[in-house]
Image (spheres, rainbow, N blue to C red):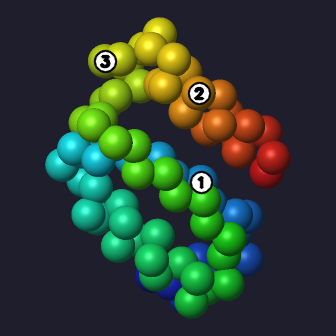
Amino acid sequence: MTIQHAKGLPSMYMDVGEKDIFRDECIDYCSKLPKARLSIELHVLPGLGHGFDGLNAGEPAVEAVVVARYGAIKGI
């Protein structure tokens, strides 16, 4: 998706683990969205890797992230 196509979309929420192999790409993508005047909520989660929500399910920190994620979805 180019930034021009992002205009008019709802605000964005993203969470990514600090050790995720796609962390830099996620941060880079989110850094471009303000140019499209989109509101962004980005969480980089210390010590967590790719798939943290499945691999670490039940841990309090992960459960808090899942609650925040679904709260963002409900807010759309």
Residue type of the residue flagged with mark 2: Ala
Q: Quadrant of residue 2?
A: bottom left
Point out the tag, 3 or 1, that comes first from the N-terminus: 1
Decide which of 55, 43 is in the foreground and name it: 43
Tell me, yes or no, whether the two marked residues, 3 and 2, touch with CB atoms within 8 Å: no
Residue drawn at x 31%, y 18% is: 55
Category of crowding for the residue at label 1, using alpha-carbon neighbours closer than 10 angstroms: few (below 14), some (14–19), many (at least 20): some
Q: CA distance from mark 3 to mark 1?
A: 21 Å
Say which mark, if any, is on residue 55: 3
Q: Which residue is the extreme one toward the left?
A: 21
Residue drawn at x 57%, y 89% is: 35
Residue drawn at x 65%, y 37% is: 68
Q: CA distance from mark 1 to mark 2?
A: 14 Å
Q: Is residue 19 left or right of residue 54?
A: left
Is residue 41 depicted above or below 56 in this figure? below
**Element class at badge 2:** helix
**Element class at badge 1:** strand
Q: Quadrant of residue 33?
A: bottom right
Is residue 16 depicted above or below 61 in this figure? below
**Element class at badge 3:** helix
Is residue 66 depicted above or below 29 in this figure? above
Please provide percent x and percent y for residue 76: 79, 51
Please provide percent x and percent y for residue 39: 68, 71
Point out the tag, 1 or 2, that comes first from the N-terminus: 1
Category of crowding for the residue at label 3, using alpha-carbon neighbours closer than 10 angstroms: few (below 14), some (14–19), many (at least 20): few
Q: Quadrant of residue 29?
A: bottom left
Residue at image mark 2: 64
Say which mark, if any, is on residue 13: 1
Residue type of the residue flagged with mark 3: Leu
Q: CA distance from mark 3 to mark 2?
A: 15 Å
